[in-house]
């Protein structure tokens, strides 16, 4: 694809902007993208290109802003990590959590974002060969316990006894 500005080089920068439901696209070569700080690309205004490459923190912060576009409640904006003192508003502005405890303290706002971005909050990818067996057994044990609770609630006691026995077998193996 050829650069829409210089019409010479191959376009490597693709900019898409959606305004009022209308999609506008511009394809530029790296040189034109670097040379032009403010681009007036028939988007109805100027478009600033970022100085640096996108970082995970910038993307996460932008997602948090997008997902939480509804007016903030006072409790959400006042959330603070008990361990490091990072506030929710600081996290939203820079996309970086202060410590591992922040995940627990901001759980109610983080998990919907993670679930929306990744589709799930549990890892479902590949596992290491050496430690993967233990992880799979723990996951299987957890699934059996959940199934046991469902079967008991449905009053299927014979099936519950079978599941209980499977759970005991797995626990003996640990």
Image: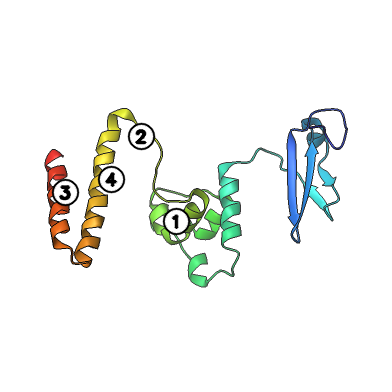
| Nearest to N terminus: mark 3 or mark 4 | 4
Image side of residue 61 versus residue 9, left or right: left
State whether residue 114 is above or below residue 157. Answer: above
- Residue 115 or residue 34, whichever sits in front: 115
Q: Quadrant of the N terminus?
A: top right
Q: CA distance from mark 2 to mark 1?
A: 22 Å
Give the spatial CA distance, label 3 vs label 2: 22 Å
Q: Earlier in the sequence, mark 2 or mark 1?
A: 1
In the displayed structure, would residue 7 be above or below residue 89? Answer: above
Tell me the CA gap for discs 3 and 4: 12 Å
- Choose the circle earlier in sequence order: 3 or 2: 2
- Going from N to C along the chain, the mark reached first, 1 or 3, is 1
Query: Left or right of 56: which side holds 111?
Result: left
The image's mark for residue 139 is 4
Rendered location of residue 95, percent (x, y): 55, 50
SS under mark 1: helix
Q: Position of residue 91 (x, y in %)?
A: 52, 54
Residue for badge 3: 167
Q: Are marks 1 and 3 in contact (CB under 8 Å)?
A: no
Left or right side of 83 for 36: right
> Which element carries disc 3, helix, strand or loop?
helix
Q: Residue at x 39, y 35 (%)?
A: 126
Q: Residues within 10 Å of mark 2 (few under 14, many from 20)?
A: few
| Quarter where residue 156 is shown | bottom left
From the image, tell me which residue sits under label 2.
127
Residues at marks 1 and 3, CA–CA distance in whole angstroms: 29 Å
Query: Of 61 and 82, which appears nearest the observer?
Result: 61
Q: Which residue is mark 1?
A: 111
Camera-nearest label, 1 or 3: 3
């Amino acid at each position: 694809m050829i650069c829409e500005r210089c019409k010479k080089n191959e376009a490597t920068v693709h900019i898409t902007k959606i305004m009022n439901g209308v999609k506008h696209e511009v394809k530029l070569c790296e040189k034109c993208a670097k040379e032009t700080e403010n681009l007036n690309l028939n988007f109805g205004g100027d478009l600033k290109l970022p100085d640096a490459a996108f970082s995970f923190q910038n993307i996460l912060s932008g997602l948090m802003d997008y997902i939480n576009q509804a007016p903030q409640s006072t409790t959400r904006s006042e959330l603070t990590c008990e361990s490091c003192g990072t506030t929710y508003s600081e996290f939203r502005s820079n996309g970086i959590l202060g410590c591992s405890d922040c995940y627990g303290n901001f759980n109610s706002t983080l998990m919907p974002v993670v679930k929306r971005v990744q589709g799930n909050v549990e890892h479902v990818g590949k596992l290491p060969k050496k430690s993967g067996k233990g992880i799979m057994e723990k996951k299987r044990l957890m699934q059996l316990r959940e199934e046991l609770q469902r079967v008991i609630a449905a009053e299927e006691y014979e099936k519950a006894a079978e599941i209980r026995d499977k759970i005991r077998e797995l626990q003996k193996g640990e």
